[in-house]
Amino acid sequence: MKYVDEFRDGKVARSLAQTIAAEVRPERRYHLMEFCGGHTHAISRYGLRDLLPPEIRFIHGPGCPVCVLPIGRIDSAIELARDHGVILCSYGDTLRVPASERMSLLRAKAEGADIRMVYSSADALKIARDNPEREVVFFAIGFETTTPPTAVALRQARTEGLKNFSVFANHVLTPSAIQNILESPEVRELGTIPLDGFIGPSHVSTIIGSRPYEFFAEEFQKPVVIAGFEPLDVLQSVLMLVRQLNEGRAEVENQFSRAVTREGNLKAQALVAEVFELRDRFEWRGLGEVPYSALRIREAYRDLDAEVRFDLPYRSVPDHKACECGTILRGLKQPQDCKVFGTVCTPDNPLGSCMVSAEGACAAYYTYGQFKGSAEVAEAS
Amino acid sequence: MCLAIPVKVIELLEAEQALVDVGGVRKEVDVSLVDGVQAGDYVILHVGFAINRLDETEAQKTLAMLREMGVQPEAAA
Amino acid sequence: MSANPKPLKHGYIRPLDLKHGKVEMSHGGGGRAMAQLIDELFQQAFDNPWLRQANDQALLTRPEGRIVMATDSHVVSPLFFPGGDIGSLSVHGTINDVATSGARPLWLSAGFILEEGFPLADLKRIVDSMATAAEKARVPIVTGDTKVVERGKGDGVFINTTGVGVVPDGIEISGDRARPGDRILVSGYLGDHGVAIMSLRENLSFSTNIVSDSAALHDLIAAMLQAAPDIHCLRDPTRGGLASTLNEIARQSGVGMAIREEDIPIREEVDAACELLGLDPLYVANEGKVVAICPAASADALLAAMHLHPLGLDAAIIGEVIEDSHGFVQMETSFGGRRNVDWLSGEQLPRIC
């Protein structure tokens, strides 16, 4: 695969790792938040921790839209399918997320709700066209990368005059999440979580550009490197962050220059702005209410908004009492700090979303960390 | 998040769709989010949509930098 | 008129309409309609001395050796896919279950649950495919059963096949026999079947050159046992893929495993298709591959024997069994890093994230 395989070259990886090892200062630690679930996955899948010196420590951020989706929103999706008899179209990731009453979309499907997995919003549109007598709802989730495809579907539904299609929108915004973490008291004032820099999400940035991060770098004096998802991209970005930190710089650098520009994809941004607007606030699982962090469908397209069409009430549902996903998502705790990690809460029986999504900190750690043996990993932390 | 992969545009189709190829697998995708896509271009594919073009020059630059960055001062001697 | 060359018998008024006819409730009713379905469709296709007797059972001669029995039910959707169909899959699948014990498969049974309204033309296609597969494998279908359920209560057709075979003395193959130091081999490219199936599923449309690898493995396995009679474990990595099979055996044997990513044969297109969907090829189903675990000393001879067989051309040694009470399957990535290859929790679903 072109532009993929070259960025997975093991030999280059090993020599990059050696350079990183040579440049880290042994007296300090480099706490790097990899915001995005895709990076968590890449680090686990390629065993990058094994290559990197112990001075580098990764903190998993809340960049997993499945992980931060509040239970109440999944309950609403289940309600749509079960009680309103719609065909609910959902991405695969969301199907297993645990909701209230031990329910999930997958369980609801087993009980007879018409819930269908789709790979694309275009598939949901097709289902609507093919089933004119049924209401079809597209369960939209994701950060800025996934929002434009939803916007395209909404505009297309409008153009075609599709009467039976609507969207249940749960799109969230990256900069707001980053800000929320940086402004949490532990980070800002107390310095409890040493958070030195960010490995920024690349695909989100193809849409929003590198500009939005400049504020954080400036205001909070933390370097940001926008990193591609291939292992060499991640390693190069780590090296760039190490260098910034060693040199006392706090800039936005773009490692994924092959698809990210400062301005981003203006056409996609414009389309999103045409269809969506900011919500005042939105509940993030684990982070609580975060202002201006999510999108809802604009007035002009509101007839295609499932929340309006089906008059969905929103119930805020607290997490399981023992669940530490909130603190883990903020980088305040590690999975092994959670009392139920690996005992009651496992990938087979996830209590919180950190465990249900393969990108979640707990799921990734369960797979990776257990095998290492907890003592070894604790030492490396 | 955002599983996305660089794919090569093989052919433009009607209704702002294109046939793309990655590693021998072909798929029809939506290219309405990226202006001026041509056959032969590389685009980033996410959930059935091209979300941006891949700049091949930049890609080559990055690869060159990667190889260079990876060389230790001692090893280069 | 049907293409049935035999004269109508038993007072059937007209031959089955195998082009446009549909399965009806009467076909499962035990009466004349069912007898005709069996005669003109199943018997025609599977024809052998046992079926010709038209009894409810097959009378078999007791073979020499230890008897092995295996059963599989097939619910695959879509019914027809590149490289096979539910019919050939059901024959190959059970032959393989029998053969991975080291047994020579001798006989198969086939039970059908048909949905009312299912096209007879499709049923004929499936049955003919089973007949071809059974004949090629030289394993006859000696007895069977047919039931019909009401429209809406079945997915077109469900098939159960049961197989009986015999294991010669001196062969001891079982999932709990893997020992530290043993080598782990696979017979060829992984992930073909799962990707071929997914290419047809409604929501995932892409055209690849990938066809299902569905095949009967008993000949290959016989050749493998010739070269290495001391093979410890054999299993075909079907649902859940290589990863699930290795985890199962690790748990059964109380050992761990260390495999190398670079040595695992996966086609570029399968890799690309999995990338597109966010799937891990290690968890994708195979229907014509076998995993073998043998003592280190026999590994080279085993590999050589596999390479000589058409179904083992791309066989490879991918790792070894190690001491590990946790039963972890570790993989050395192409980077030299290590990652765990864990059990699947539930079905692997395509990701966007």
Image (spheres, coloured by chain):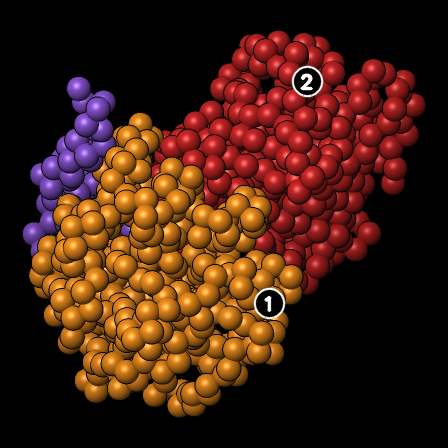
Chain colours: A orange, B purple, C red
Q: Amino acid at mark 2?
A: Pro
- C93 in relation to C145, above or below: above
Res A140 visible: no
Q: Is residue B31 left or right of C105 when viewed as pictured?
A: left
Q: Amino acid at mark 1?
A: Lys
Res C297 visible: yes
- A339 in relation to A25, above or below: below
Residue C342 % position (x, y): 56, 45
Question: Which residue is rendered at x = 58% and y = 54% of the image?
Answer: C345
User: Considering the numbered disc 2 on the image, is that residue within a helix, a strand or a loop?
Assistant: loop
Residue C79 % position (x, y): 55, 46
Question: Which residue is rendered at x = 21% and y = 24% of the image?
Answer: B74
Q: Chain of mark 1?
A: A
Q: How many marks?
A: 2
Q: Is residue A55 left or right of C134 when viewed as pictured?
A: left
The disc placed on residue A78 is none
**Identity of the residue furthest to the front in this view:** A27
Location of residue C62 by image quarter: top right
Question: Which residue bears the numbered disc 2?
Answer: C295
Residue A86 % position (x, y): 45, 77
Question: Which residue bears the numbered disc 1?
Answer: A339
Q: Is residue A208 left or right of C32 when viewed as pictured?
A: left
